[in-house]
Amino acid sequence: MPFVKGQRANPNGRPVGSTSFRTQLQEAFVAHMKKSVKDAVGNETAFFNVFNETFMSSALDPKSQAFKFLAERLYAEDILKDVDAQVNRQRREDADFAAYRIHRMAFDIQQRVLASKAPDIGLMAGRRAGKTGVNSLKASDVALTSGHRRVLIIGLTITKTEGLYREDIKTVFDALGCEAEYKVTDACYSLPNGSLIQFGGNANKAEREKYRGQDWDLVVIDECQSQQQLQYLVEDIIEPMLIATKGQLILSGTGPRTRGTYWEHFYNNPRPMGLRLNWDLTSNPNIPDHETAIEEYCTQRGLAPDDPMVLRELRGLIVYDDEALVYRLSDKNFFTWEEFDFWLKGQSPDDIRFVAGLDFGKEDSDALVVVCYSEKRDEKFCVWEYKKNGTGFVELQEAIKAAKFFIENDPRFSYAYRKKFDIYADTNESKFILDANVHYGLNILPAIKHEKAMGIQMMQDEIRSARFRVIKDGILHGEMLRTIFKRLELEGQPSIVTREIDDETYHPDALDAMLYAMRNWFLTHGTKNWAPSSPPLNAPTVTPQEPTQDWKDLQKIKERQRPADDQLS
């Protein structure tokens, strides 16, 4: 047989095509270890199994050679290092392989999110673009590739979050062979490596506050276009919980329906190293007929391809739903203090009056609005605005006192005779009302709450006709830019703007306080002469009515509680 000379460690060469003697010996050893023999009870098994069991049993005797051999080999430092290295290497390889498998499930733009180490990520995308999918993959990636990691996904409610994410994440786990346990009572996935994926909601203040004091490696907030108190949730609650872990924050949703939202501000003002991505369903390869899907969406709803709803909901763009705004302001609705001072001097001192509205923040913010008006001239100015979240009784009554002090002591109002004013509020907060009236003399009266839609319609006419004016960029101005009506979706027809305020998109507080104050004015001054100059879109026909019994009862309460109102200040 011919030889190949000159090979390293074999100067004389070896037969062509043969393996080395070392390899042949290893193969012979492995074959012997696999040889079938009978164990102690007569069952057929591999030689290695019988040898290993016999050796380990004898190693339990401290006097045996097996015990001495095992102790010397097992507790040698280099052996332990090798074992640790092998275990750690296996874990890394498992994690890397899991990450690889997860990345293979994502399409191009989703892979950018999975690979990103950015501290905060904003995903503004249209529906069916794959936001839920990438959030599920990112949560799975963080939880699977390292042990004892904590992931929190917050939707509008826990139920909606579970409905969107539970099955998606289970699909990822099943594909990777991960036997994660879902705990229904806790609404979370518990993984064998000690990691956790928790589902949560943001339906009220209690749900927001319960997240405090915890640490998370990843927090995902979905449906940001409809989240309540988003800025407070992010900046006061979530971000402090990511400091210790140096965790990531992901905000995702479609474009906002209104101006001035925190979601739009977050997306348009990324912090250093922040990642912002915008895409629509045309980038999703799982929807190959995406243009047909858009056409069907437009056909079903009677919309044009460039309709604001299509651009916002499907294309993932920032397009405001101005048609649904409850109050639409023009430049004539704003005033400066110089303009107000000039107007004030043109009034009779006896004609200047004040009225206030107060909205208690059971779940959201407390708000107080003071309106100055003339008895003879149909003009009104919001001269005091207050709004704050998370306040207590003491801070709120101090805010009310500050408003009263401003009206009574500011030099511009020295010209007015009557500076005292009533405050109208939802008196369901009976304990506060009692304390405020009896102990603090704040004179808070029950607000008119029935037929709210008619009150809103009357307020719309005040704003359209510029009879009601506010400070530009003030609290009321900000809320008017963000408060919209709900839309009713009808198959085959364009959506209809309803008369119900969309609290999920934005819940107004100062506007409710404004309405409480103005509804009393409507009854005492404007009901009989009121007629809208141009009815709002889809507004019901309203016929002005004579004062109701509720109004008459209210006047009796006022007469009992404000005997000093007719006296000059």
Image: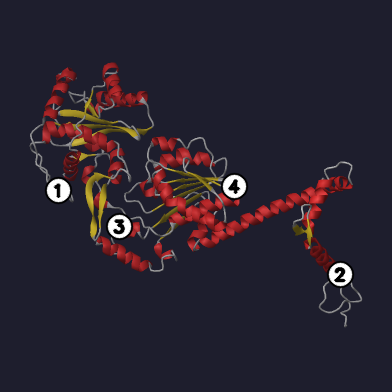
**Spatial separation of the CA atoms under disc 4 and disc 1:** 62 Å
Packing grade of label 4 (10 A; few <14, some 14-19, many >=20) is: some
Tell me: residue 296, above or below residue 59. below
- Residue 549: x, y in percent? 11, 28
Amino acid under disc 1: Pro
Task: Give the color scheme: rainbow, by chain, secondary structure or one colour.
Answer: secondary structure
Q: Is residue 141 left or right of residue 380?
A: right
Q: Earlier in the sequence, mark 2 or mark 3?
A: 2
For the residues labelled 2 and 3, the Cα–Cα distance comes to 76 Å
Q: Residue at x 22, y 33 (%)?
A: 516
Q: Position of residue 192 (x, y in %)?
A: 59, 47
Which circle's residue, 3 or 4, is located before the other in the chain?
4
On residue 567, the disc is none
Tell me if residue 445 comes above or below residue 471 in the rendering: above
Instruction: From the image, tell me which residue sits under label 1.
Output: 535
Q: Which residue is mark 2?
A: 21
Figure check: 126 above or below 77: below
> Which sits earlier in the primary sequence, circle 1 or circle 2?
2
Q: Nearer the viewer, residue 484 or 472?
A: 484
Q: Secondary structure at mark 1?
A: loop
- Cβ atoms at labels 3 and 4 below 8 Å apart: no
Of residues 52 and 202, the one drawn nearer to the viewer in this rendering: 52
Can you identify the residue that label 4 sits on?
192
Do the numbered discs 2 and 4 sit on residues whose CB atoms are within 8 Å? no
| Closer mark to the observer between disc 2 and disc 3 | 2
| Three-letter amino acid code at the position of disc 2 | Phe
Q: Quadrant of residue 37?
A: bottom right
Q: The disc labelled 4 sits on which kind of residue?
A: Pro
Q: Which mark is residue 309?
A: 3
Cα gap from disc 2 to disc 4, whole angstroms: 45 Å
